[in-house]
Amino acid sequence: MTEAYGIHELKKVFFFAVEAGNVADKLSSVNGWISKAAAALPLTDEFIGLLSLDPKKVVLEVKDLSQSEKDELVSLVIEKYDIKDDQKEALIEEGMRLVASMIDCAMAMSAYAKKWSK
């Protein structure tokens, strides 16, 4: 059986997702391919971090997250990426919490479906 990663590896996934959002925000405000390429450059570090991960282990870790680990991930993302537009920042923070709740819901539905499919 494949063993799950720890929360450290899962942070790479979250940081990539948020950095992708930051890059998309920057891309919408610059013109010219050189400016767009420069705006996208910060995404490369986060992408390289993702390449080292096994998706199956990431899924196992997501399934195994405790509430305190979910809270830690949300807090880390909020601290690492300070978006200048407070309204956008609030929406992204709420979105992060919603994603964490959706993961819980999906896991519960999966367990329920497995229980009743036997």
Image: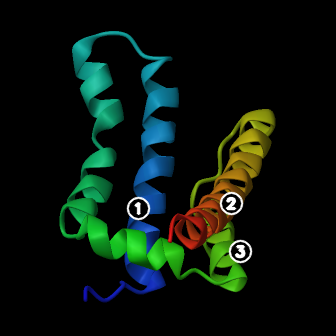
Q: CA distance from mark 2 to mark 3?
A: 16 Å
Q: Which mark is residue 21?
A: none
Is residue 71 shown above or below 3? above
Q: Label 1 neighbourhood size at 10 Å, few (<14), some (14-19), many (20+)?
A: some
Q: Which mark is residue 105?
A: 2
First reached walking from the N terminus: tag 1 or tag 3? 1
SS class, disc 2: helix
Q: Is 48 displayed left or right of 92 in the figure?
A: left
Residue in view at x 24 percent, y 70 percent? 53
Residue occupying the point 48% across, 60% down: 14
Report the amino acid beneath label 3.
Asp
Q: Earlier in the sequence, mark 1 or mark 2?
A: 1
23 displayed left or right of 35:
right
List the residue tagged with mark 3.
71
Where does residue 50 sit, x and y in percent of width and height?
27, 61
What is the spatial separation of the Cα atoms under label 1 and label 2, in whole angstroms? 20 Å
Element at badge 1? helix
**Residue in the image at 66% along x and 55% along y:** 102
At mark 3, the secondary structure is helix
Earlier residue among tags 2 and 3: 3
Mark 2: give few (<14), some (14-19) or many (20+) Cα within 10 Å. Answer: few
Residue indicated by mark 1: 13
Q: Where is residue 48 shown, x and y percent of the image?
A: 21, 59
